[in-house]
Amino acid sequence: MTLEIKTITAHFIFNNYVNCYLVRTGDGYILIDTGMPNKRGVIEKELESAGCQPGNLKLIVLTHYL
């Protein structure tokens, strides 16, 4: 199985960034970390540009909390 990983970077505060990772699998996508709530639009746009449509996101993995 071939996996594709896309890094999504969103500004957090000041010059800090939050990275999220979108993994494309054979039957959908996995999102690792989701960024900050106020960056939802940025994340949704990046998901869409990567080809991840509603229903294709199979799993969200949160590795930490602020």
Image (spheres, helix red, strand yellow):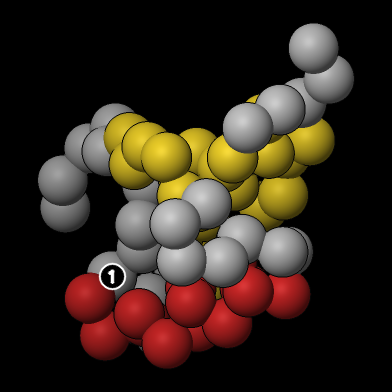
Foreground residue among 16 and 37: 37
In the image, residue 10 above or below residue 38: above
Report which quarter residue 46 is drawn in: bottom right
Residue 3 place in picture, x, y as percent:
76, 26
Which residue was labeled with disc 1? 36
Residue shown at 68% from the left, 39% from the top: 24
In the image, residue 57 above or below residue 44: above
- Which residue occupies the extreme left position in the image? 65
Along the horizontal axis of the image, is 27 left or right of 34?
right
Residue 7 place in picture, x, y as percent:
67, 52
Along the horizontal axis of the image, is 4 left or right of 33?
right
Along the horizontal axis of the image, is 15 left or right of 12?
right
- Badge count: 1
Residue shown at 56% from the left, 66% from the top: 53
Report which quarter residue 63 is drawn in: top left
Mark 1 belongs to which amino acid? Met
Pick the quarter of the image with the N terminus. top right
Residue shown at 28% from the left, 70% from the top: 36
Report which quarter residue 34 is drawn in: bottom left
Residue 32 place in picture, x, y as percent:
44, 40
Report whether residue 9 is seen. Answer: no
Residue 50 place in picture, x, y as percent:
73, 64
